Each structure stands twice: as structure tokens, then as C-alpha cells.
Image (cartoon, rainbow, N blue to C red):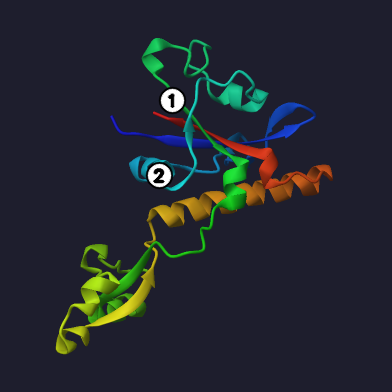
Amino acid sequence: MGIYVTGYTETRVDGKWVCIDFWQPDENGKYHHVPCIEGQSMVAQALEDGCQMENIWTPEDLSERVREMCLHKDGTLIGTKQMDGRPWHMVPGSWFTKADLDQPEYCGFFPRQMVADYLANPDGMEINEDEMLCPGEYTALDEESKKGYQYFEYTPQWGSRTILRRMKRNVLARLEAYNDRTYKDITLSDVRVLLTIW
């Protein structure tokens, strides 16, 4: 069975956590939760490698909305059964204020033809990072071989940096919508993202 990640955005209001995620209606008018981040093993790896994610015990201070969404069929909270392990993780709001996600994921020297092909069709082609040379490797090449390479900065469409940028953008959108609706001035520092990783 594969890993699955679901992220819930909460902010503290008057001493209590409140879920500020979006809800989307289906064709029958039933509303469904829109996680701030979701996915499988690639998303879990990006969170593990690229951000200040903590594995935590089952939170006792969950917002009512998140608690309702995280129940087993028998009504018990996810993470309270021994078979659950420790599925709860948390990214503190302070990480979003410090993380520099504008930098590219890869910086180095790539085969010139590969870069040209990618720039001609960025939606249909990915660059193979295994063929990147670091500056030291590039410098060691003879002059003729150097002509086949060029410096390029690259972030894969499904890379860790892209996943984390998307999560931050989603959290900021929820924060802005909540502040507009409630006339509050909640900041990223007031937010946490709770994650269930199964």
C-alpha cells in the first residue's frame, strides 16, 4: 500500500485552532475539503527533505473541522489506535516566513542540446538532472567538450521545490481569504499545516 499525504491549514483565533482551508461543492451541492497539499510518496519526500516538518503525537488541540475529517469509521480519531502508528506531522507557520523557495532546485552545467530541447518544449520534456555537471566537473573538461554544455538553473515540474512552492502559495491564498472574510490580520506566523501521512 502506498503513502498518502493530506494537509490541513489551521490558524489560532482567540486561543483556539480554526481550519481555514477551502471547500468546493460537487454537482450535487455537497461540499468537499480542498487540502493545502496532498499527494503520495513524492509529496511526502519533498516535505521530509525540504521543510521543517515534525512528526508529532496526535494533536489534542485540533480544530473541530479537522477533527471531523480525521475520524475512523468507528468514530475514533486517526492516530489514537496502535495500528495507526504516528501519522500526524506538522509544519509550523514560522517555516513559511523563513523558507527561500525562489531559488532553483538545480544550478549547474547541462548538455546544451538538452537545454535547447527543454526550452523549446518545457511542458513536454524534463531535464535529466543526472547529466548536470557541477562547476568543478565543468572546469575539468577540455575546451572542446565545454562547448557541449551551458550553465542553466532548473526546477523540475514535479520536483520538491515546486511542491513546496505550491503548498506555500495555497496556504497564503487561504490566509488572504480568511483575513478578507473576517477582517482579521492573521499572518503566516499564526498558521500551522497539519499533515496525515499514511
Q: Quadrant of the C terminus?
A: top left
Q: Position of residue 65 (x, y in %)?
A: 64, 27
Instruction: Residue lying at the far right in this picture: please name it.
Output: 183
Dividing the picture into quarters, in which one does residue 191 lie? top right
Query: Label 2 belongs to which residue?
Result: 43
Q: Which SS class for mark 1? A: loop
**In this view, 131 is above or below 116:** above
Q: Which SS class for mark 2? A: helix
**Label 2–label 1 contact, CB within 8 A:** no
Q: Position of residue 118 (x, y in %)?
A: 32, 75
What residue lies at 58% left-to-right and 51% top-to-bottom?
Answer: 98
What residue lies at 48% left-to-right and 33% top-to-bottom?
Answer: 54
Q: What's the amino acid at mark 2?
A: Val
Query: Label 1 belongs to which residue?
Result: 87
What residue lies at 61% left-to-right and 47% top-to-bottom?
Answer: 171
Q: Position of residue 41 (x, y in %)?
A: 34, 41
Mark nearer the N terminus (2 vs 1): 2
Q: Quadrant of the N terminus?
A: top left
**In this view, 173 is above or below 136:** above
143 left or right of 106?
Answer: left
